[in-house]
Amino acid sequence: MKNLLIISPYFPPVNAADMQRVRTSIPYFAEGNWNAEIVVVDECYTDMNMDNLLSLSVPDAIKVHKVKAFRKAWTSKFGLGSIAIRSLWFYQKKVDRLLESKHYDLIYFSTTQFPVCILGPHWKKKYRVPYVIDMQDPWHSDYYRDKAKRPPKYWFSYRLNKYLEPLAMEQVSGLISVSESYIKDLKARYPVLEQVPSATITFGAFDPDMVIAEQYKGRFRKLLDDRYTNIVYTGRGGTDMHAAISAVFKVLKRGIDENKTGYDRLKFYFIGTSYAPAGQGKPSIMPLARIYGVDKQVTELTDRINYYHSLNTLLQADALFIPGSDDPGYSASKIYPYLLTQKKILAIFNRESPAISILKEHGVDHVYDYQRVQDADIDAFLSDVSAGHHMVQQQNAAAVNKYSARALTLSQCRFFDRLFPCG
């Protein structure tokens, strides 16, 4: 059995989206003949939301090493609030000690806190340990260059990423990505990567989460109004999702104006749409609802909620909505919790998004791209939900198995094995 050292600054109990790959994979690495350990940042150094229930899904036998980070209260004075930047020095010292005391065959960076990846070349050169980077999102990207509305500190982060990304890519031994387009973009930018093994491996559906969600459902405050037929989305918002959402709001407004049965009792919930601290998030969906005149049928809660609170809210919903980004590479790893609920789903993405084929493979009926979706398609979904028709989504068993966390973790293991052709 080979030894795998995973680098993921966020890990349970931290409720961060980019640790979900590791959290749902780590129970299965041993089955693929990889003994996994993980190096994380101690949760006391982050201001992210905590969800202690997430730790229940992590096997007790997994060895978790914790590192420190510089306090954000100090570093933010210089504009450096990133957990990756704040923990970089501590990561180098800690992992140096680990590599000096034990043999590890591979280092696996699985995080969107990408600056930590620049330590890969150091460990490869000093200790001869290869490293793989998991591209859950683009690292350096031109997506916002021509956008009027940009993320905070975009000027700085764009230039920092442009400088750091090539440092990590020059020596990387393998690339995993949730979207094939991310790897294509990297290979176009860095020709050296043409000879580097790569694989597109999505996140997987993790059945144990539904057991935990059901077991602890009494802990969570109910967010939905039973007087309505509730259609729920949980996850980040943003103007990049407006094209997908606008298509729905337009049809909803017309249905209300035409007095279609039950349309006035439909309520859309968008929950946890901002990454800002609690109470400080700015709505990104309600302004759009007001433009279309459906604000009475829409509720946006910007504050993030705990992961299992989110799962329970999806389970309480009458139906689910997954709006995708206008970014063609957007994969929406969040689709798997939605699929686990077996609720009726409306999903609208960019036509290039890999999420479309995955959802269709599962047998989801209402999956569209916003460039070509017809009003009649959305109207059919809203009419069915209003009437309470076919609210359980039957899924293709082969797809359920193919996209399980276990199956996709074993795919990661097989990819790791490719880096050691002599065994």
Image: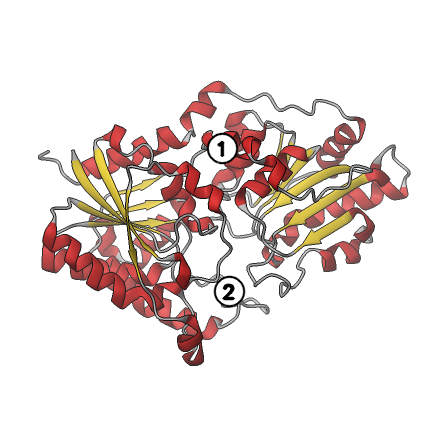
Asked if one can make out residue 170 in the rendered structure from this viewpoint, the answer is no
Q: Residue 316 at x, y = what percent?
A: 67, 34
Mark 1 neighbour density, 10 Å: few (under 14) some (14–19) many (20 or more): some
Instruction: Identify the residue at image location x=81%, y=50%.
Output: 294
Cα separation, mark 1 vs mark 2, equals 27 Å
| Amino acid tagged 2 | Tyr
Seen in the picture, residue 21 relative to 81 is either above or below; the reply is above
Instruction: Name the element at disc 1.
Output: helix
Q: Could you tell which of marks 1 and 2 lies nearer the N-terminus?
A: 2
Q: Which residue is mark 2?
A: 144
| Amino acid tagged 1 | Ile
Hey, which quadrant is residue 284 in on the image? bottom right
Looking at the figure, which quarter contains the C terminus? top left
Hey, which quadrant is residue 68 in on the image? bottom left
Seen in the picture, residue 257 relative to 280 is either above or below; the reply is above
Q: Which residue is mark 1?
A: 358
